[in-house]
Amino acid sequence: MIFHEIYSVYYQTVAKILEEALDHPLKQDEICNIIEKYAFSESILSIESALREQKWQLLKSDGTTIFKNDPSMPLTTIQKRWLKSICQDPRIHLFQDDLKEIEFPEIEPLFTPNDFYIFDQYQDGDDYTDESYIRNFRMILDAIKNQYPLKITTYNHKGKKVSMKILTKYLEYSEKDDKFRVAGFGSRLGGTVNLGRIISCERTKTAENTELIHRIPPRKRRVFFELEDERNALERVLLHFAHFPKKAEKIEENRYHIMVDYDKDDETEMVIRILSFGPMIKVVQPEHFINLIKERLRKQKSWER
């Protein structure tokens, strides 16, 4: 079944009226206002009269309802199939522990993880079943929602433990790396930190400079590069830099000029991301970014020796 009448605007509008009637007796003008807000302009002619004249025996004459609980909308089959598919994603456990209510044993999933193949994804992604990882993820997510600072202990690039206080901005996920990162403000944080490198995080007292941190203007940078659209490179670049402001311009067949804006704190990460595309990307501006690319390549060459 593609459509069922219980999902129509009329049903949902009447459900809203009944919700309000459970809270307090409704007057005629309140009913009309709800109909005007949730239904069509002409719906007031049919819905209001059907309720008032008891064609639909849902409201009493005093404006209350015969219902005892809020009317709920049942899930469609396609919604159940989608939920069952999402539950097969290992990342779901970062958000939810008990999944029994949405297992739906009688329903086939809409899709499974085996239906997708990400051909350029690294194989050393984060472990989403690790209890410490889940605990840190949820703490960071709560800090983002409620805007309080965290004390994070992590490993630096030398493998040593370091602690810092940060005010988190957002979480980002890289499909190519199969890793989550947290971005935030903090004197020793830089731009982003991989969750997999975090040892622990805990709520800390509101920093005295929290308000000041919000006022710090982002140090914007811009990089320009040319792209050879081989092996679906354009689509992969646009996906890889999805959360960065960007602009793509076609300059000739299978060749594009790309501009990406980023924060100064994310510069090292940006260098690594661009290098991951190999010869398909050539940075053309600015000069200091080209020098960063060259320096990174020199270091890699020295490490190989």
Image (cartoon, rainbow, N blue to C red):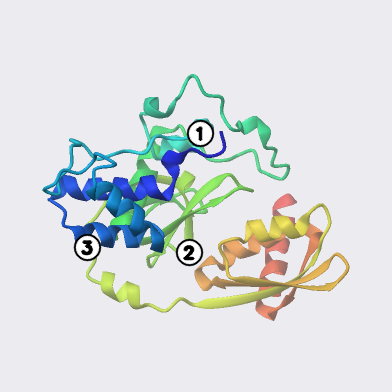
Q: Are marks 2 and 1 in contact (CB under 8 Å)?
A: no
User: Which residue carries the number 1 mark?
Assistant: 90
The answer to whether residue 247 is visible is yes
Distance from label 2 to label 3 (Cα)?
20 Å
Residue density around tag 3, few if under 14, some if 14–19, many if 20 or more, within 10 Å: few
> Residue 27, which numbered label?
none
User: Which residue carries the number 2 mark?
Assistant: 191
Going by the numbered disc 2, the residue's amino acid type is Gly
User: Where is residue 175 drawn, in percent x and y?
Assistant: 60, 48
User: Where is residue 55 drawn, in percent x and y?
Assistant: 28, 42
Going by the numbered disc 1, the residue's amino acid type is Pro
| Quadrant of res 270 | bottom right
User: Where is residue 159 drawn, in percent x and y?
Assistant: 49, 48
User: Which residue carries the number 3 mark?
Assistant: 206
Residue shown at 69% from the left, 62% from the top: 274
Whether residue 92 sits left or right of residue 98 in the image: it is: right
Label 2 element class: loop
Distance from label 2 to label 1 (Cα)?
27 Å
State the residue lying farthest toward the top.
106
Nearest to the observer: residue 252 or residue 53: 53
Residue shown at 82% from the left, 52% from the top: 231
Whether residue 112 sits left or right of residue 305 in the image: it is: left
Residue density around tag 1, few if under 14, some if 14–19, many if 20 or more, within 10 Å: few
Which of the marked residues, 1 or 3, is nearer the chain's N terminus?
1
Label 1 element class: helix
Whether residue 144 sits left or right of residue 190 in the image: it is: left
Q: Are marks 1 and 3 in contact (CB under 8 Å)?
A: no
Query: Of discs 2 and 1, which sits in the foreground?
Result: 1
Nearest to the observer: residue 134 or residue 83: 83
Going by the numbered disc 3, the residue's amino acid type is Thr
Residue shown at 51% from the left, 33% from the top: 90
